[in-house]
Amino acid sequence: MNASIAKGHWQRLKGALSALWGSLTGDRLQVVYGRHQQISGRLHIAYGVAQLQLERQVTSIRRRSAARRIT
């Protein structure tokens, strides 16, 4: 297991714990943030993409998706 995959697993675990804590406390934003971390961690594991690159790609996908819904 290389460092990139290990970071992805750690990020996924942090996201799961964050979402669980949000569920327990009733904080919906914390749940969303935790789920976002989980997805980011899974993508990091699958593709080995650095976090900053991953954020840029996800933002780009969101913008394209929003533009398609408007037209």
Image (tube, rainbow, N blue to C red):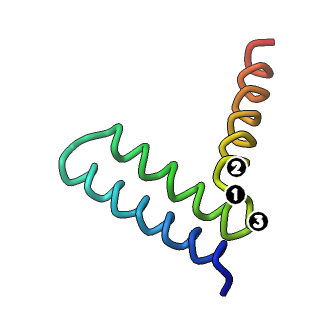
Res 54 label: 2
Neighbour class for label 2 at 10 Å: few (<14), some, many (≥20)?
some
The relative height of residue 21 versus residue 46 in the rendered view (above or below) is: above
Residue at 33 percent of width and 44 percent of height: 30
Nearest the eye: 65 or 51: 51
Disc 1 residue type (three-letter)? Ala
Q: Which element is circle 3 on?
A: helix
Res 47 label: 3
> Of all residues shown, which one is farthest toward the left?
25
Q: CA distance from mark 3 to mark 1?
A: 9 Å
Disc 2 residue type (three-letter)? Leu
Relative to 41, 69 lies left or right: right
Residue 21, percent from left and from top:
26, 56
**Which comes before the other along the chain, label 2 or label 3?**
3
Q: Which element is circle 1 on?
A: loop
User: Picture quarter containing residue 6?
Assistant: bottom right
Residue 28, percent from left and from top:
32, 39
Residue 33, percent from left and from top:
43, 45
Res 50 label: 1
Disc 3 residue type (three-letter)? Tyr
Determine whether label 1 and label 2 are within 8 Å by CB: yes
Q: CA distance from mark 2 to mark 3?
A: 10 Å
